Every structure is written in C-alpha cells, then in structure tokens.
Image (spheres, rainbow, N blue to C red):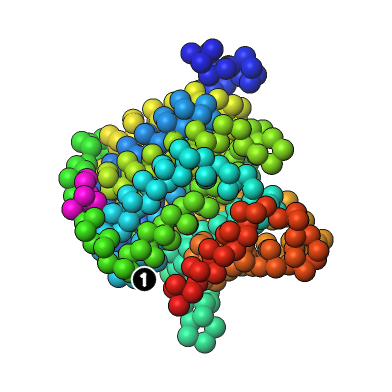
C-alpha cells in the first residue's frame, strides 16, 4: 500500500494520510445535508438524493484516489447543484428527470473528452490569471446563493437585492450558524463547517426552529425514486431546447471542476509550471463520477475545494481519498439525523466556501489592464447573471480582444481563439 501510493516519495505516512482523510471528510460532510435540500427544491426525493450523494461521492473519491493518486474528495458540486435546481429546473421549467438525463449525456461527453485528453489540454492552456478568476468568481456566485437561501439577502423591485429581515428567528439562526463556522475555522479547526452546522442545528432544536429526530441511526434511504430515471427520459433530450441545456451542463461542469482542480492541485504542490501532472486520470475520475451520479440521482459531482483542509493537514496521496470514501460509507446509516437539518443552518456553508474560493483574487495580476478587466468580468458576471458559464464566456471573449489590442496576440494559445468563437456562437444561439 505504501509503495502503491508512494508514501516515501511524497514525504507522508499512514497516520498523516488517515488524519488528512478524516479532516477532509468532516469538511465535506455538509454536502450530505445541503445537497438533498438543494435538489429537493426541484421536486426530487430528499432521501434518495441523500443516498445518491453519498454513493456518488464514494465512487468518485475512490476513483481519483486510485487512478490519479490525488488526496482529493469528489462529491456533488455546490455550484452545479444550484445550477441544476435554480437555473435548469426552476428557471427553465425543465423536469428534474429530464435535467438528470442532460447530466448523464454531458457526463458521457466528459468521459470522451477526458480519454482524448482534450479537457487536460484546455485546462493547461487557460492563462493562469483567468484560472484564478474562475475560482474566485465561482466563490462569489456560491456565496450569493448562500446569502439568498438564508434570507440575509432578498429580492427588491427597486434595488434588485436588499438586506432581509435580520430579526426573524430563521435568519438569526442562519447568522448564528455562519458565525460559528467562521469562529471555528479562524481558530484553525478544519472541520469548522461541519461542526458549525451541528452546533447551529442543536440550537435550532432547542429553540423549536428545527424538528427533533426520532432516531439517529436508521436504514439507508432507498434510491428507487431517482435511480435509473435518466434512461426513461433520454428521449426528452430530442427537444431542441435541451441541446442548450446539455451544452450548458457540459460547459459549466467543465470549468467548475477545472477551476477547483486547479485550486486544490496548486495548494497540494501537484501543479508544476502552470500544468497539473497526471491531470488526465483525475479528470477521467470526476467524469465517471458524473455518469454514475446522474444514474444514481444527483447533480454533477466534482473535485471539492474542501479537499484543501485535508491537504493542509498533510494529505499528499490517494490514500487520503480512500479514508474520505470510508467516511461517506459510514455516514449512509445516519440519514434520520441528517434529514432534519434545515437550509438555515447549511446555507452559511456556501458563504464560507465562497469566501475561501474568492481568496484567489489575490493571485490575479491587477496591474495589467488587459488581464485585470477580463478577470474582473469573469468574477462579477457569475453572480450578477446567476451563471458560472456566462461569466466565463464573457471573460474568455474579452481576453483575446484586450491581448490583441495590447499587441500580445502571439501569447494567446490557439485554443483560446477557438473558445472565443465558440462562446460568441453560444450567445448567438441563446439569442
């Protein structure tokens, strides 16, 4: 085992990897609570989504640990589950079964692109500054969703958004949950998000804002309501409007996962010369996780930025991922306890995770206008358009223009020009 995972070469040990795996799992465990709540708003069965979330996380995390030897956890992405529910199902009025079929097809396309190493090439050719902007932009977008779901930010006809009723019990509980997470993380407790949710849930039960669970350990919720639904709704994808949905799933997931993988790989010291060694296998792992996840009944899994907590604790190999997967397997038996936890105590996790991702803005070269403006557009347009894809597309359209005007056209990778044309066509098609 030590030889397979290259413990000696990477300067780690069984104990160090185990501690790192537990740390990452505790940091990621909130996804078991939040994902069912988010996807259930599209009409999906919460219990089935809970099981699908855990099993998809187990499969994806084992794959990236064994295939790529990366200390990374894979689970349904917070940005992509929000996109699935709020943009596709609620915004475009597409049934969740059809949306899952779209996720399945985009996952198959992901696998093909990964095997052909096209994803790896595109990720490696994206300018470093734009990579940081993508990560930061996703962070702002996720934080905005968290603020909205907690009621801290509400819609306003005059100003579009405004401060919500911060004196209501539900919003106060959300604020308390956020403060608890923040305090724990600032104190160096890497699993602060998880424990913040636990503490806020207990307070919510005492205050009568959250139902008390009748039991802690129970049987694993059935996957029947969601399992295999994609195969009964593939014919729905023949609708021309679904082509845009599939493309958007593919597009958003591509750059969501790429951004997070870039961020986590950089922290782990895996990235060398702006390239991620063995990225093909890592990308194949999350691609396969997307296919299995859609069949099970969850939105697209992706590499989780919370993996940074385990990396900070010393995780350097795929054995960290094995430990994370074991944690998800054990959690399957605690669905009665997890099912009572409400949006008010979980959505602050989106704000925290968004803040962690937004820290990437410091790595952008703000002194060069030709880089600063496209990066800024990527970041600001993600939350303002409620779309990760739109933010990236607009930034990638502007970047070649500003670089050409600056006389730096030769510094642009040819694929960036291809993306420039593709994104223009994308907007024309949507129009």
The answer, for residue 40, to whether it is visible in the render is: no
Percent from the top left, x then y, of residue 388?
51, 61
- Identify the residue at image location x=58%, y=48%: 122
Q: Please state which of residues 185 and 409 is positioned toward the viewer in this rendering.
A: 409
**Image quarter for residue 168?**
bottom left
**Image quarter for residue 209?**
bottom left
Is 62 displayed left or right of 305 in the figure? left
- Which of the image's four quarters has the C terminus? bottom left
Percent from the top left, x then y, of residue 318?
51, 26
Dot 1: within a 10 Å radius of its alpha carbon, few (fewer than 14), some, or many (20 or more) residues?
A: few
The answer, for residue 271, to whether it is visible in the render is: yes
- Identify the residue at image location x=81%, y=64%: 407
Is residue 192 placed above or below 415 in the rendered structure? above
Q: Please state which of residues 58 and 247 is positioned toward the viewer in this rendering.
A: 247
In the image, the segment drawn in magenta is: 226-232
User: According to the image, label 1 marks what residue?
Assistant: 91
Percent from the top left, x then y, of residue 21?
50, 29
Q: Please state which of residues 407 and 299 is positioned toward the viewer in this rendering.
A: 407
**Image quarter for residue 324?**
top left
Numbered disc 1: secondary structure: helix
Q: Is residue 187 magenta?
A: no
Q: Please tell me how many numbered marks the rendered image carries.
A: 1
């Amino acid at each position: 085992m030590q030889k397979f995972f290259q413990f000696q070469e990477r300067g780690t040990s069984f104990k160090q990897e185990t501690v790192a795996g537990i740390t990452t799992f505790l940091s990621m465990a909130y996804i078991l609570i939040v994902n069912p709540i988010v996807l259930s708003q599209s009409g999906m069965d919460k219990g089935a989504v809970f099981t699908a979330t855990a099993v998809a996380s187990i499969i994806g995390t084992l794959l990236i640990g064994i295939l790529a030897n990366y200390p990374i956890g894979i689970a349904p992405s917070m940005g992509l589950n929000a996109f699935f529910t709020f943009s596709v199902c609620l915004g475009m009025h597409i049934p969740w079964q059809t949306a899952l079929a779209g996720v399945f097809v985009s996952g198959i396309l992901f696998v093909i692109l990964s095997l052909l190493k096209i994803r790896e090439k595109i990720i490696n050719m994206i300018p470093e500054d734009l990579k940081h902007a993508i990560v930061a932009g996703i962070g702002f977008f996720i934080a905005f969703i968290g603020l909205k779901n907690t009621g801290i930010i509400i819609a306003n006809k005059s100003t579009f958004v405004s401060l919500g009723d911060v004196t209501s019990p539900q919003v106060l509980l959300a604020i308390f949950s956020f403060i608890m997470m923040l305090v724990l993380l600032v104190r160096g407790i890497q699993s602060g998000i998880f424990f913040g949710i636990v503490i806020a849930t207990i307070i919510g039960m005492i205050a009568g804002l959250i139902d008390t669970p009748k039991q802690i350990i129970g049987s694993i919720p059935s996957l029947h309501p969601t399992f295999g639904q994609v195969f009964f709704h593939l014919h729905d994808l023949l609708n021309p409007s679904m082509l845009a949905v599939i493309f958007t799933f593919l597009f958003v997931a591509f750059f969501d996962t790429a951004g997070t993988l870039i961020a986590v790989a950089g922290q782990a010291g895996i990235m060398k010369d702006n390239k991620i060694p063995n990225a093909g296998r890592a990308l194949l792992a999350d691609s396969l996780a997307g296919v299995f996840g859609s069949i099970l009944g969850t939105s697209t899994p992706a590499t989780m930025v919370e993996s940074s907590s385990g990396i900070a604790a010393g995780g350097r190999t795929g054995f960290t991922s094995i430990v994370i997967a074991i944690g998800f397997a054990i959690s399957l038996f605690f669905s009665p306890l997890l099912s009572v936890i409400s949006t008010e105590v979980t959505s602050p996790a989106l704000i925290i995770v968004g803040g962690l991702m937004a820290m990437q803005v410091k790595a952008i070269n703000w002194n060069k206008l030709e880089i600063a403006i496209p990066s800024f557009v990527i970041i600001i347009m993600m939350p303002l358009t409620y779309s990760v894809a739109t933010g990236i597309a607009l930034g990638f359209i502007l970047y070649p223009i500003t670089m050409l005007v600056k006389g730096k056209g030769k510094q642009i990778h040819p694929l960036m020009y291809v993306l420039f044309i593709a994104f223009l066509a994308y907007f024309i098609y949507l129009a």
